[in-house]
Image (cartoon, rainbow, N blue to C red):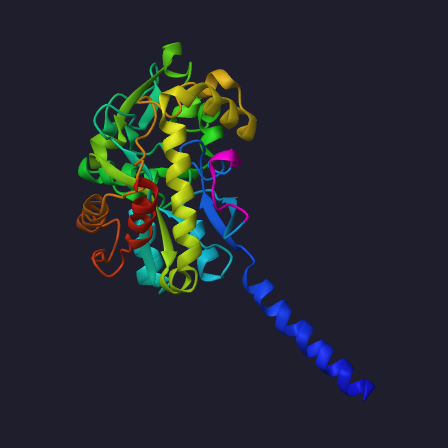
């Protein structure tokens, strides 16, 4: 009798425990490479403006060198939301055989009136034209990343193949010092590292990302289709919070507090981030809507110039904007 009672009690406890486990928030592991361009390390700092954080989801931003290293992390089940460029998306689908979906905007380069990343050289150095880059050392955050692909597109159009220069992989943060110390001959300058660098008069842009690829969806978020299907409700909650937070950061009346949060989170001097979330920064969609046509154009250009052996048609199969569309309806009603 005692054994029967114990079994029944244990069964009852198990039944109570199942719903409790089912209600645990979904942990979203989110890739990012450079901040505050990539907002993943910042969006979840101000919990007061987040309605669902800790309830239906928890955000876990994870830093990577660039977009291409995130492919392996997704394949290994160690990353849920990847910050991809166009060529990384192709590699994920065609090479890694991942069933990915473009789901949201991260940053857009070359939007009229907003920042476009320059490729910078020493003003008094030997490089005066693109042809002078032959035989030189060019810094890249990661081969196959968005900025790396833009650089190669521009160089191919001017007659330089990959074999004509040496690629030196480095963190964006280290690139200015590497150029100053003559360890590389050209860098991609992100806005958070530009303050005082160009103004010194010692460095000049040779070309910009907009020169290379025009207005572009430089980085976007991509997710596996099966992860979306399994966690749709939590993901809609997440994107509702994402949009609410993004709009808060982009609102000029919140600029001082937003910069304070960014400086504290990134352990960076506040004055170096004054540009952030203004038109001196990359454009970010307040509705998280990516430019699908621009992604396709970047892929087509990379194939045409031989950077990619094989392309892909992004829409409609590899696009799912239903998460951000449903989140926007909730937020705007």
Q: Quadrant of residue 275?
A: top left
User: Depth check: 210 or 53 in front?
Assistant: 53
Above or below, 317 against 196 in this view is: below
Q: Residue 33 in the image: state x and y as whole percent.
A: 45, 40
Q: Residue at x 48, y 54 (%)?
A: 79
Q: Residue at x 42, y 29 (%)?
A: 184
Above or below, 316 against 3 in this view is: above
Q: Residue at x 52, y 36 (%)?
A: 47
Q: Residue at x 42, y 64 (%)?
A: 230
Quadrant location of the N terminus? bottom right
Q: Residue 197 in the image: state x and y as whole percent.
A: 41, 16
User: Depth check: 310 or 98 in front?
Assistant: 98
Q: In the displayed structure, does residue 295 sit left or right of residue 103?
A: left
Above or below, 215 against 307 in this view is: above
Q: Residue 85 in the image: state x and y as whole percent.
A: 33, 45
Q: In the displayed structure, does residue 192 sit left or right of residue 268?
A: left
Can residue 24 be spotted in the picture? yes
Q: Quadrant of residue 194?
A: top left
Q: In the displayed structure, does residue 300 sit left or right of residue 62?
A: left
Quadrant location of the C terminus? top left
Q: How many marks?
A: 0
Q: Residue 8 in the image: state x and y as whole percent.
A: 71, 81
Q: Residue furthest bottom?
A: 1
Residue stretch in magenta:
45-54
User: Depth check: 19 or 157 in front?
Assistant: 19
Does residue 48 show up magenta in the picture?
yes
Identify the main secondary structure in magenta: loop
Can residue 85 be spotted in the picture? no
User: Depth check: 13 or 209 in front?
Assistant: 13
């Amino acid at each position: 009798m005692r054994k029967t009672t114990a079994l029944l009690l244990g069964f009852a406890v198990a039944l109570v425990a199942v719903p409790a486990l089912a209600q645990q928030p979904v942990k979203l592991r989110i890739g990012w490479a450079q901040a505050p361009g990539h907002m993943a390390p910042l969006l979840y700092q101000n919990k007061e403006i987040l309605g669902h954080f800790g309830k239906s989801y928890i955000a876990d931003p994870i830093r990577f060198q660039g977009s291409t290293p995130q492919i392996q992390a997704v394949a290994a089940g160690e990353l849920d939301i990847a910050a991809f460029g166009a060529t990384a998306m192709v590699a994920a689908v065609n090479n890694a055989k991942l069933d990915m979906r473009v789901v949201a905007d991260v940053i857009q380069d070359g939007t009229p009136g907003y920042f476009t990343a320059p490729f910078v050289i020493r003003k008094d150095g030997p490089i005066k034209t693109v042809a002078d880059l032959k035989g030189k050392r060019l810094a890249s955050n990661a081969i196959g990343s968005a900025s790396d692909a833009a650089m190669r597109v521009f160089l191919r159009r001017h007659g330089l193949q990959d074999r004509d220069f040496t690629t030196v992989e480095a963190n964006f943060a280290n690139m200015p010092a590497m150029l100053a110390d003559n360890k590389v001959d050209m860098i991609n300058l992100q806005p958070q590292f530009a303050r005082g660098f160009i103004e010194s008069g010692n460095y000049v842009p040779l070309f910009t990302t907009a020169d290379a690829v025009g207005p572009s969806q430089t980085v976007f978020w991509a997710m596996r289709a099966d992860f979306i299907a399994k966690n749709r409700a939590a993901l809609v909650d997440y994107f509702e919070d994402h949009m609410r937070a993004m709009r808060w950061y982009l609102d000029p009346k919140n600029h001082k507090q937003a910069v304070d949060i960014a400086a504290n989170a990134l352990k960076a001097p506040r004055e170096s981030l004054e540009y952030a979330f203004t038109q001196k920064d990359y454009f970010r969609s307040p509705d998280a809507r990516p430019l699908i046509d621009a992604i396709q154009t970047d892929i087509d250009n990379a194939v045409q110039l031989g950077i990619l052996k094989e392309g892909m048609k992004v829409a409609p199969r590899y696009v799912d904007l239903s998460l951000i569309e449903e989140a926007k309806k909730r937020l705007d009603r």
